[in-house]
Image (cartoon, rainbow, N blue to C red):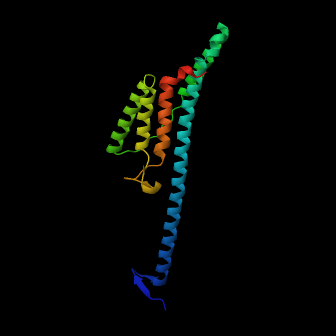
Amino acid sequence: MAQLQVNKGEVVDKASLFQRSQSMAARTNHLVETMDQLETRVEALRDQASAMEQEKETLLEMLHGVQSCQDIRNISDGEREELNVTAERLINRVLTVDISLETVRDQQQEESLNKAMEILDEAALRLKKDMDGSKRCLSTLLQACLPDEGEAGGTVTRGPIDQKIPVAGHWMLHSRIRRRYVRGSAC
């Protein structure tokens, strides 16, 4: 039979305490499941924000490309002016969209990112003068973000590697180089 305990004048059935702990476990499981669902939604939100940033860059590149396109030089001055005014209006509207997606980094990661950005800037500056040297430099930078190849074709990692780094590296590299050096030759 269940034991009864008197606590401050109340009668407590010890069997009901066991049921409460089961209830606590169920609540805990529910909260963990909720947190897992929220984490999935947060990642989806970050992915969407990243896609929006990329779309903004693409739109700006396309608008600048239209403005510097060879075909625009072959139309009348009035039509050219109208296209340029429209392009400027659209560029200004795109620039009003502010998307902020930040990644929390420790000091070592910040230093590595700054060094990588310096390498990208150097490569972008050298790009027109030394295409092969720039390509080797950028390839080396990308390889630093990838796992090392081990024996027999397996991969060996020296530490945790964020699988999104190569994707971010490609996007960052392409957008930086296009933004600085390729815009004028879009058409």
Q: Position of residue 182 (x, y in %)?
A: 52, 24
Q: Position of residue 179 (x, y in %)?
A: 50, 26
Q: Quick check: can you spot residue 13?
A: no
Pick whichever, 161 or 45, lies toward us: 161
- Residue at the limit of the structure toward the front, as seen here: 152
Q: Residue at x 33, y 39 (%)?
A: 111
Asked if residue 107 lies left or right of residue 181, the reply is left
Pick whichever, 150 or 2, lies toward us: 150
Q: Quick check: can you spot residue 105?
A: yes
Pick whichever, 125 or 36, lies toward us: 125
Asked if residue 159 lies left or right of residue 53, the reply is left
| Numbered disc total | 0
Residue 68 placement: quadrant: top right
Pick whichever, 106 or 99, lies toward us: 106
Q: Residue at x 48, y 28 (%)?
A: 177
- Relative to residue 155, is residue 45 depicted above or below? above
Q: Residue at x 66, y 8 (%)?
A: 78
Asked if residue 183 lies left or right of residue 10, the reply is right
Give the quadrant of the C terminus. top right
Asked if residue 93 lies left or right of residue 74, the reply is left
- Residue at the limit of the structure toward the bottom, as seen here: 1
Q: Position of residue 52 (x, y in %)?
A: 56, 37
Q: Residue at x 55, y 48 (%)?
A: 44
Q: Position of residue 107 (x, y in %)?
A: 32, 43
